[in-house]
Amino acid sequence: MEFDEVLDTTGLVCPEPLMLVRNAVRKLAASAVLRITATDPTTERDFQHFCQFMGHSLLTCEQAVDASGQIVFSYLLQKKAA
């Protein structure tokens, strides 16, 4: 799936990833898609609640293991339409 912006929050822990996502979404145009990578497992819950509260859409949530054995989460978040 295509995205408009990328935000890497790997290595950060709650609440930093959510704060960065909130700031990034504010700068996006309506209906734009943000791709987020994270290593904090709480981001799945945090981003779901953030989207529900703000009216955005969490399009995908995937996880993979990188070369070092770390779980990396990948999200696509779509900002609500104007």
Image (cartoon, helix red, strand yellow):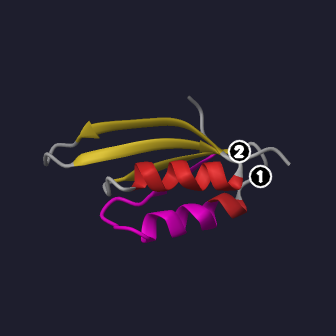
Query: Badge 1, how many Cα within 10 Å: few under 14, some, many 20+?
Result: some
The magenta region covers 4-24
Residue 59 on the magenta span = no
- Residue 44, which numbered label? none
In-front residue for pair 60/37: 60
In the displayed orientation, state which residue is furthest to the left.
68
User: Residue at (48%, 50%) from the top-left corner?
Assistant: 36
Image quadrant where residue 67 sits: top left
Q: Which residue appears farthest toward the right when viewing the image?
A: 82
The amino acid marked with disc number 1 is Ala
Residue 64 in the image, given as x and y percentages of width and height? 28, 37
Q: Amino acid at mark 2?
A: Ala
The residue drawn where x is 44% and y is 51% is 45
Q: Badges 1 and 2: C-beta atoms under 8 Å apart?
A: yes
Identify the residue shown where x is 62% and y is 67%: 23
Report the residue marked by disc 2: 32
Q: Is residue 74 above or below residue 10?
A: above
Residue 5: x, y in percent?
Answer: 60, 50
Tag 2's secondary structure? loop
Q: Position of residue 6 (x, y in %)?
A: 53, 51
State the residue position of label 1.
29
In the rendered structure, the answer to whether residue 17 lies left or right of residue 73 reads: right
User: In the depicted view, which residue is nearer to us: 67 or 42?
Assistant: 42
Answer with left or right where residue 8 lies relative to residue 5. Answer: left
Quadrant placement of the N terminus: top right
